[in-house]
Image: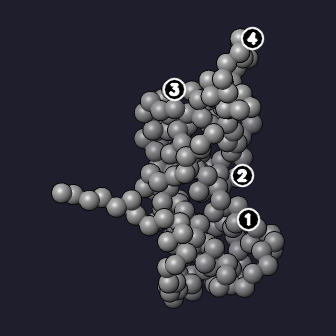
Amino acid sequence: MLIVSSGPTESQFTNLSLQMDSVLFAEFLLWKEHPSRDRSTAFLSRIYREDIGPCLSFTRSELSQLIQRAVENNSLTIEPVAMSALPMVKASALECGGPNGFRGSVETKCALSGLSRVCRHRIKLGDKGSYYYISPSSRARITAVCNFFTYIRYIQQGLVRQNAEQMFWEVMRLRREMTVAKLGFYLTDQG
């Protein structure tokens, strides 16, 4: 009999002991002296190679590259799929896509994976008018990378008021978020 574990839950992660990797911390400290988004720094080079690249590597590689540039430039929009005009007949909230009737599901091919999935979100790159429907898994991967870049921008702008060790652990948490997302684990919207 094969027993498959679902792995540690988020609450179990909080019980983990933390031990700082001295090489990673040294790379972070060196980057933190002059924070930039320059990929040639040891700190960002490692994160691009180990986390960002794999997390944003999808079947449609050309679109993946465009998404990565949009994330880097902070010009990507992710939004829920809006329902088209609702018919004038009464229907349950579930049939209308939720209690507010605005969120809908579109069964279509995910623009990134090429697989038929229920796509509850779409993305837009920059000011271009084209929207791409994405699966929940693809959304989780993109969002994880966006969260990392947002935090890096906050550090660059001097908005983070933590000591270096606290910043480092937040970066490691965000790296873990990217790793978990690229492996296909994500939280589902339950309504």
Residue under label 1, please give it: 153
Residue under label 4, please give it: 88
Please report the residue visible at 50 percent of the width from the left and 84 percent of the height from the top: 17
Closer to the chain start, of discs 1 and 4, is 4
Residue 76 percent coordinates (x, y): 68, 45
Please report the residue visible at 62 percent of the width from the left and 79 percent of the height from the top: 168
Q: How many angstroms separate mark 3 from mark 2 (CA)?
A: 28 Å
Residue 97 percent coordinates (x, y): 64, 28
Tag on residue 107? 3
- Within 10 Å of the Cα at label 4, are there few (<14), some (14-19), or many (20+) other Cα atoms? few
Local secondary structure at mark 4: loop
Local secondary structure at mark 3: strand
Q: How many angstroms separate mark 1 from mark 3 (CA)?
A: 35 Å
Q: How many angstroms separate mark 2 from mark 4 (CA)?
A: 39 Å
Residue 90 percent coordinates (x, y): 71, 15
Camera-nearest residue between 87 and 61:
87
Closer to the chain start, of discs 1 and 2, is 2
Three-letter residue code for mark 3: Glu
